[in-house]
Amino acid sequence: MSDKAEEFAKQLLEKTDSGKLQWSAFWEGPSENYRADLGDGYSFSIKRVADGDNKVLSFWLTGPEGIVLSATADNLPSTLSAIGKSAFAGSAVFPSGSIPLRALMVENSLEFTATSRFRLFSDLFYTARKNASKEVQAVEKVQELLARLG
Amino acid sequence: MRILRYAGRERIRMILHDFFDRSNSGVGLAGLALTVGALWQATGAKKAATEAREAIRQREASDTFSELGALAGDVVQLLQFERSKEAAVRARDLVARIPRDRARFERFLGGDSDKLKEIESVFQGLAVKLSSELFLEERGAVKAAIAAAFEANGELNAVYGRLLARLDKEDK
């Protein structure tokens, strides 16, 4: 399911970059939340909960009947240490140059998945934030123009 | 009879004189040979000690640049995960270590000394930017920082590779 979420996130990124998608900002307590409405009751949301350098990003698709799919990515020390432990175990168990290809592939894929998903969701989050702030600026500008009309 | 005895004494004295003269020469020659031998051995030992010291220095240089490469790799990964404080600490470590290690192992570095100055300035720039709270709060900034760190990491590893190649060549 998370592969599908990543595929959607990539598409949303492209469509937002090309100006075809609008995001709106929502704040829920300590989290920063952005939503893009697609119509027919479907919307995508990206949320970030940050505490210092620790960040958890959640991405989900909501349909008319509720959440259809969701995925998360984080940069918590536990995630990073899992990558570090895997790399360390690989080199400690097997002498240099004799690490089985399968072990290397598992280790690399774990690191690649964690890094690429975090980067993708984070890029989408920053893009949504920038897009939503443009929307906020536009609304403020229109309010200002209307106020001038008296 | 007295004359003969005197001649005999003189003869013995001369024999002894010659004996001591020759033995002195022999001892002198043996001493010279021993001195030359000792000098030769000392020169050989000194050469061996110098070679051993050089081998250790080469090993130290290789280990040092391997560590710098690993540290730069950490900066890349921490930037990818937006852990700016830890990335800043590692970047500052590199800024402190690169000039020190460059000066220490200058003679093994060949033309890469200037390249290291460029790498150092990239990490210095990153360290300064990372000290700002909001630096990694924008997609473009994160992307640029990761790209810069990736490139500097690549350059640093290339310096390490060229250093190993030079050391291999010297070994041969």
Image (spheres, coloured by chain):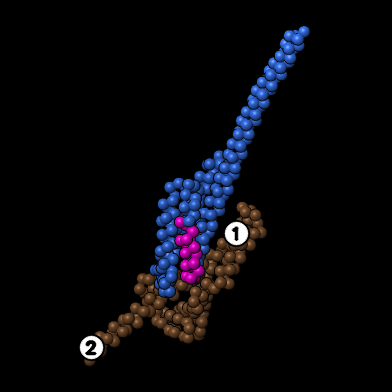
Chain colours: A brown, B blue
**Residue B55 vertical placement versus B11 (above, below):** below
Q: Nearer the viewer, residue B94 or A47?
A: B94
Could you tell me if residue A115 is visible in this image? yes
Q: State which quadrant residue A90 falls in.
A: bottom right
Sequence order check, earlier mark of 1 and 2: 1
Q: Amino acid at mark 2?
A: Arg
Q: Give the magenta range.
A: B81-99
Question: Residue lying farthest left?
Answer: A149
Q: Residues within 10 Å of mark 1 (few under 14, many from 20)?
A: some
Q: Residue B66 at what x, y percent from top left?
A: 54, 55
Find disc 2 in the rendering and name its residue.
A148
Q: Residue A45 at what x, y percent from top left?
A: 46, 79
Image-based side of B104 in relation to A93, left or right? left
| Residue at point 53%, 59% (across, down) | B70
* Chain of residue at mark 1: A
* Chain of residue at mark 2: A
Question: Is residue B165 shown in magenta?
Answer: no
Q: Amino acid at mark 1?
A: Leu
Find disc 1 in the rendering and name its residue.
A104
The reply to whether callout 1 and callout 2 are in contact (CB within 8 Å) is: no
